[in-house]
Image (tube, helix red, strand yellow):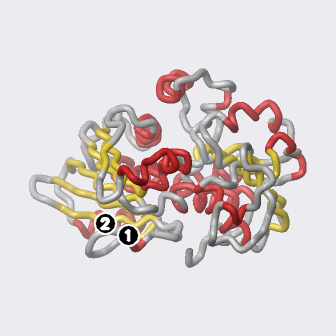
Amino acid sequence: MAKTAVVGASGFTGIELVKLLKKHEKINKIDLFSFGNAGKTIQDFSNELKCNDILKNFSDIKYNDYDIIFFACPNGTAMNAYSEFKDSKAKIIDLAADYRLDSKELWKEYYGQDHKCPELLSKTVYGLTELNKDKIKSANIVANPGCYPTAAIISLFPLLKNKLINESNIIIDAKSGYSGAGRKNLESGLEKKIKNNFVPYNFYAHRHHPEITQELNKASDNDVEITFSPHVLPIYRGILETIYVDLKNNISKNEIFDLYEEFYKNDTFVKICDNGFAEIQNVVYTNNVNISFHLGRNKKLTIISAIDNLIKGAAGQAVQNMNIMMGYDETTALKNE
């Protein structure tokens, strides 16, 4: 049985984590921490939670009291806390970007500050569960991937690994529900802006661009070049990515399907559609990745990838990583979500 803590429990991903952990059969302690909301109950931030747990002040946390600590916080929080938790027994799963990038230079370029512990960047395990299970098993710190990268990397990795597509011309047209912007942005007026609207943002400057490229390069002998175009949808949750690639050789849809079925044969949450389109409505409230393939003329291939940004793109994947780190069944608390 494990003792856990959620730092940043009142945020959107924090709420999702609490929901999952509350029904996890291997968890016997869950403490919830906040920065500005200490003293309030978790029910103040979610009508779906029936517990009355009081949010504790993060400054009072004692790391050795826990086996697993989730940081569901703004970028920089876990990085700044490293000197305090590094010698504790607690394993850390950071849902922000503090440990996702291997390069301190890229981290500074995209996040606007020097990294406080750059020596960890190339050593921390990138927690894309389907690709890094063996590393996650023995990890003390796991960098939970971003939501857009999760959908993109799982969808593209087998094709790159098998040298089937042109690495220099990958277009990722990505759309996310507005929960991906976080509670602060919604309270600042984003929800009103996107009502009956569809908003593109941060072309060529989005922080997930280097994360996607970094991980796809690990599947390829050649440098991967992507065009990543994010948008916000007028829905609360879910991500759908339409990915355009050029095949190097003629290949049938059935051959692509078989390739992915084999590549992800041990991965419960990757669902390959044998017909139709992957859609957001089929993945919300689940930890699944749904992928469909659509062959065009002249060796053109379109991939549709759908996930729930709050579950597989954040809290669900974090619990999946915890399960592996702790030696639990990977699907614990994640079935039928």
**302 relative to 310 in the view: left or right:** left
Mark 1, residues whose alpha carbon is within 10 Å: few (<14), some, or many (≥20)?
Answer: some
**143 relative to 163 in the view: left or right:** right
Residue 266 in sight in this render: no
SS type, badge 1: strand
Q: Are the residues flagged by discs 1 and 2 in contact, CB closer than 8 Å?
A: yes
Asked where in the image residue 328 lies, by quadrant, the reply is bottom right
- In the displayed structure, 175 sits above or below 213; it is below
Residue 215 in sight in this render: yes
Residue under numbered circle 1: 272
**Mark drawn on residue 292:** 2
Q: Between 319 and 248, which is closer to the camera in this rendering?
A: 319
User: At 39% across and 72% down in the image, what residue appears?
Assistant: 281
User: At which x and y percent is residue 48?
Assistant: 63, 72
Check the picture and name the quadrant holding the C terminus: bottom right
Check the picture and name the quadrant holding the N terminus: bottom right
Tell me which amino acid carries mark 2. Ser
User: At 61% across and 44% down in the image, what residue appears?
Assistant: 143
